[in-house]
Image (cartoon, helix red, strand yellow):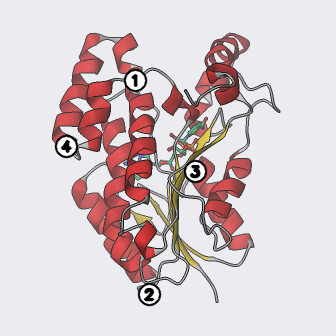
Amino acid sequence: MTRNYVVTGAASGIGAATVALLKERGANVIGVDIHNTDVNSDLSTPGGRQDAARKAIELCGGKIDGIVACAGLATPIAKTVSVNFFGATEFLNALLPTLSKSEAPRVSITSSMASLLPNSPALVDAMLANDEAGAIRIAQKLVDEGDASASLIYGSTKRALGRWIRRESIKPEWAGAGIPLNAVGPGIVETPMVADMIASAEARAAIDKMVPMPLNYYLKARQVAYLLVWLASAENTHTTGQTIYIDGGSDAALRGDNIWD
Ligand SMILES: NC(=O)c1ccc[n+]([C@@H]2O[C@H](COP(=O)([O-])OP(=O)(O)OC[C@H]3O[C@@H](n4cnc5c(N)ncnc54)[C@H](O)[C@@H]3O)[C@@H](O)[C@H]2O)c1
């Protein structure tokens, strides 16, 4: 039977590549983005998330089998918290009752290898406490402190997502309903998000120091889509709570061979 998927961030980069791959494989796909797709809603606001969920359910005819959440910002501003964390978690929670009715319900989220980079523990805690107003206040304070502090915002959103997934995935609403809940953690992917960051040799040298990718260097969006699509496929029955790094080796290079102690 044809599977119905909802993909956020569908208008560009990894989300667009995921939509294309799912369609090639015969799925029915509803895109969600702020513009240029089936459901045009702003995932940075609670109203936009609810609106997006309602329209996606309607366009799927009330049957959703998989959700792939890719919408995101890499800008060091407070809004990045609202899109990257709450734009994924609150949107997924709004779709959960519908998703739970599928015979093989699945969710995959685009986190980042940046979840391993320095972050703001206070900001991560506020997101995990589901305190969006508090998280925005902390993020704005980081912005006001200057570039070094503001640069912690993106990694904080991805760290919080990784922890939220581990915490939620084993609950009755997810594991108990047969729903694997995972993320992928890409290294650098050649999309509009990072075009400026890899535009010159100097910029690449700086980024390569932060994100070393000894295996095959930068990714194409489609290479990330393959993993997102597998995690959200019926073939994935037992992988849950994971952030799977698809990063050319940056996790291994940065954290070394012993991450268990
Ligand atoms: N490109 C990379 O190197 C890289 C690396 C690791 C993780 N990621 C993550 O991958 C995901 C996809 O990024 P990408 O590289 O494809 O970037 P992209 O900029 O090409 O795509 C992001 C999409 O999210 C949408 N979006 C942004 N704000 C939104 C909002 N308020 N409401 C609805 N949609 C909104 C944008 O319109 C865009 O279509 C992001 O979560 C990003 O953090 C990217």
Q: Which residue is mark 2?
A: 61
Answer with mark 3 or mark 2, whichever residue precedes in sequence.
Answer: 3
CA separation, marks 2 and 1? Answer: 40 Å
Quadrant of residue 199 in the image? top right
Q: Secondary structure at mark 4?
A: loop
Answer with mark 4 or mark 2, whichever residue precedes in sequence.
Answer: 2
Quadrant of residue 24 in the image? bottom right
Residue at the image position 34 percent from the left and 76 percent from the top: 97
Q: Which residue is mark 4?
A: 131
Whether pointer 4 and pointer 3 mark residues with C-beta atoms closer than 8 Å, the reply is no
Answer with mark 2 or mark 1, whichever residue precedes in sequence.
Answer: 2
Which amino acid, mark 4? Asp
Which amino acid, mark 2? Gly
Q: Is residue 226 left or right of residue 161?
A: right
Quadrant of residue 158 in the image? top left
Q: Position of residue 209 (x, y in %)?
A: 66, 14
Which amino acid, mark 1? Asn
Q: Secondary structure at mark 1?
A: loop
Is disc 3's CB within 8 Å of ligand 1? yes
CA separation, marks 4 and 3? Answer: 29 Å
Residue at the image position 55 percent from the left and 26 percent from the top: 261
Q: Which one is nearer the viewer's eye here, 155 or 167? A: 167
Q: Which one is nearer the viewer's eye here, 9 or 137? A: 137
Judge whether 154 appears above or below 254 on screen. below
Q: Is residue 78 visible?
A: no
Whether pointer 2 and pointer 1 mark residues with C-beta atoms closer than 8 Å, the reply is no
